[in-house]
């Protein structure tokens, strides 16, 4: 694994869990908040935990924020502070700034002032839950771009006993099955004559709309 230097600023529920998981995944994590109590809670879990005001450019220079691969602004309640922090970081040429927004409008604002990426955790969670309730056979989804996704799913009942070649998903729907999990073993699908079984799980790549319409309904 390529370990990265990541600063997580703002230790609310989202920021705290993000910093914790990144540290557990082996990354070098700097956790920052203005609340001493939150810093004390996480200081033994990350490489460095600091109480600091990141709207002060001198503070950012002192902690060398521009040396981090990613800076995640995990707070979203004080838009003015976030904007000021991003402006300072852009001047310092921080490589990649990720913002957290509460609303689509806030997301647009943060992108316009220089954030490289902005996430809407509540929106993403709602979309995932809606997908799960609508398509129970969908196990996981990885968005590739606006229209295409890689989706892990339980093999559809209509696929049971049929080969990849006979289904001809690429020609019919522009979809490709690239991996198959059977008996807890996951392998890349290279044999077009492979026959799908009841408990198989497959990874399908292509138009999310086509996958949901033709494989998950």
Image: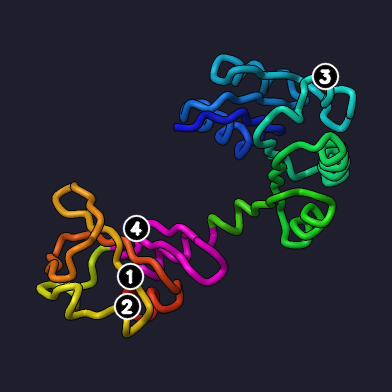
Q: To which residue does mark 3 refer? A: 62
In the image, 192: left or right of 41?
left
Separation (CA) of disc 1 from disc 3: 50 Å
Query: Which of the two labelled residues, at mark 4 and mark 1, occupies the earlier sequence position?
Result: 4
131 magenta-colored = yes
Separation (CA) of disc 2 from disc 1: 6 Å
Identify the element where label 2 is drawn.
helix
Identify the residue at image location x=39%, y=75%. Answer: 212
Query: Which of the two labelled residues, at mark 2 and mark 1, occupies the earlier sequence position?
Result: 2
Q: To which residue does mark 2 refer? A: 170
Separation (CA) of disc 4 from disc 1: 17 Å
Q: To which residue does mark 4 refer? A: 139
Q: Nearer the viewer, residue 22 or 144?
A: 144
Identify the element where label 4 is drawn.
strand
In the image, 165: left or right of 28?
left
The residue most toward the left is 161
């Amino acid at each position: 694994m390529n370990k990265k230097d990541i600063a997580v600023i703002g230790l609310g529920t989202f920021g705290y869990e993000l910093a914790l998981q990144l540290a557990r995944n082996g990354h070098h994590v700097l956790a920052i908040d203005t609340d001493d109590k939150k810093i004390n809670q996480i200081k033994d879990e990350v490489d460095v935990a600091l109480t600091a005001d990141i709207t002060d450019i001198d503070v950012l220079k002192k902690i060398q924020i521009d040396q981090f691969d990613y800076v995640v602004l995990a707070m979203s309640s004080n838009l003015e502070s976030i904007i000021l922090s991003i402006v300072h970081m852009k001047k310092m040429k921080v490589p990649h700034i990720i913002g957290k927004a509460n609303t689509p409008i806030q997301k647009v604002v943060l992108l316009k002032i220089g954030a490289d990426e902005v996430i809407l955790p509540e929106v993403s969670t709602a979309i995932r839950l809606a997908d799960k309730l609508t398509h129970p056979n969908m196990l996981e989804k990885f968005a590739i771009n606006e229209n295409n996704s890689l989706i892990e799913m339980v093999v559809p009942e209509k696929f049971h006993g049929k080969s990849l070649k006979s289904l001809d998903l690429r020609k019919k729907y522009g979809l490709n099955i690239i991996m198959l999990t059977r008996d807890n073993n996951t392998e890349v699908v290279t044999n077009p004559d492979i026959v799908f079984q009841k408990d198989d799980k497959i990874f399908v790549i292509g138009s999310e709309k086509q996958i949901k319409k033709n494989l998950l309904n």
